[in-house]
Amino acid sequence: MIETAIYRQRFSEDELTAQRGFWKPICDYLQDWIPVDGATLHLGAGYCHFINTIESARKIAVDLNEENLHRYADPTVECVVTEGNNLSAIEASSIDTAFASNVYEHFQTKDDVAESFREIWRALKPGGRFLILQPNFAFCAREYFDFFDHRLAFTHKAMAEGVGIAGFEVERVIPQFLPYTSKSALPKAPWMVWLYLRCPPAWKLLGGQMLLVCRRPG
């Protein structure tokens, strides 16, 4: 699988250590939408920075890259090796929060993305939330295809339309949230990320990723 080979060389161990540090303030920001006593599913868990850090009674990491899951997921995290549009291993209406981070640009087709949305809807409890952190092509077009494994491109409007078709209520859309990539020269110290997240005007200058907060009605 091409992604497995790419991820072996994309980030050094020093870069991964830095990422683990700045995911703490990101998770602190997102925690308002994620109940600490609930079940949280991370779709496209990758190096597991989010799912290892977020506070949640039950944690599930879903990724097709079995090597990364077994290497980086904490022992308390349940690992499910599967494609993002097949969550048959997850019981229906059993998840309080689903989080998809930088994953849908890697899908083969938009039909696969739509199927993933439906699978997330099925896995969530009524009233559960679906958080999407995703590159926003409207604000990072020049650099978007600098990554060999990027196949699909979405804007915040397209993503909101897609989840709406799947039956979600879109509670909040932030077109520009985080910078496009951690490969940038922007400072990554956790305290600077904490400060950035509390300064929304900076998002409109530096943000290349969108954040959507969606809810399964019920």
Image (cartoon, rainbow, N blue to C red):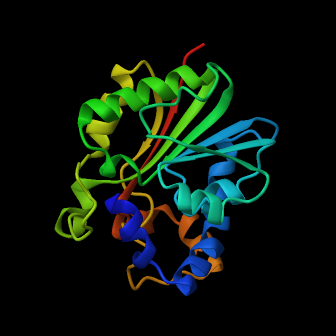
* Residue 207: percent from left, percent from top: 38, 64
The answer to whether any part of residue 192 appears in the image is: no
Q: Nearer the viewer, residue 158 or 5?
A: 5
Residue extending farthest to the left is 142
Count of marks overlaid on the render:
0
* Residue 32: percent from left, percent from top: 68, 45
In the displayed structure, 218 sits above or below 175; it is above
Q: Quadrant of the C terminus?
A: top right
Q: Residue at x 49, y 41 (%)?
A: 82
Q: Residue at x 64, y 59 (%)?
A: 70
Q: Quadrant of the N terminus?
A: bottom left
Q: Residue at x 61, y 19 (%)?
A: 92
Q: Nearer the viewer, residue 146 or 216?
A: 146
* Residue 161: percent from left, percent from top: 30, 29
The answer to whether any part of residue 24 appears in the image is: yes
Q: Is 11 positioned to the left or the right of 193 in the image?
A: left
When asked about the image quadrant of residue 164, the answer is: top left
* Residue 16: percent from left, percent from top: 56, 77
Q: Nearer the viewer, residue 67 or 31?
A: 67
